[in-house]
Amino acid sequence: MMSCLNTQVLVSEMDSWIKIYKGIKDYLFIALLDHDNEIAQDSQQILMKFFGITALTDKVIEESGDIVLRTLEVAFPAEKGDVEI
């Protein structure tokens, strides 16, 4: 995956890259929580590539909302007595 993202992304390929991102985003964000640092680092690098491609950034952010929240909930679970907003 990282090798594919090292190439220039053409405007004609944007829809295909968004489809790919939609298919793997859950795995990438959950992998950030893995205690195996290598897996988390690989996932971080791939996410940075998707977020770093200017032409894709807005759509990638739009597609990421739910999984970002779910990842944060797993990383920082509510404790008894916490106030829910």
Image: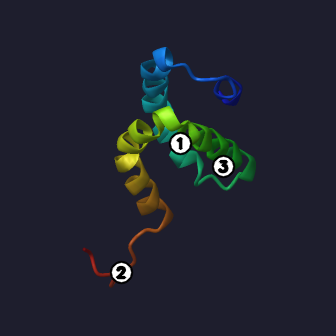
> Which amino acid is tagged 1?
Phe
Of 54 and 78, the residue lying toward us: 54
- Residue drawn 73% across the image and 53% down it: 37
> Which amino acid is tagged 3?
Ala
List the residue tagged with mark 3.
40
List the residue tagged with mark 1.
51
Answer above or below: position of 4 versus 65.
Answer: above
Looking at the picture, how far across and down is residue 31, in whole percent? 58, 46
Q: What is the C-alpha distance between the residues marked 1 and 3?
A: 16 Å
Answer above or below: position of 4 versus 57.
Answer: above
84 on left or right of 24? left
Looking at the picture, how far across and down is residue 39, in whole percent? 69, 44
- Residue drawn 33% across the image and 85% down it: 81
Q: Secondary structure at mark 2?
A: loop
Q: What is the C-alpha distance between the residues marked 2 and 1?
A: 35 Å
Q: Secondary structure at mark 1?
A: helix
Mark 2 or mark 1: name the one nearer the start of the chain: 1
Q: Secondary structure at mark 3?
A: helix
65 on left or right of 21? left
Say which quarter of the image contains residue 69. Answer: bottom left
- Residue drawn 47% across the image and 40% down it: 57
Q: What is the C-alpha distance between the residues marked 2 and 3?
A: 29 Å
62 on left or right of 18? left
For the residues bearing labels 2 and 3, Cβ distance under 8 angstroms:
no
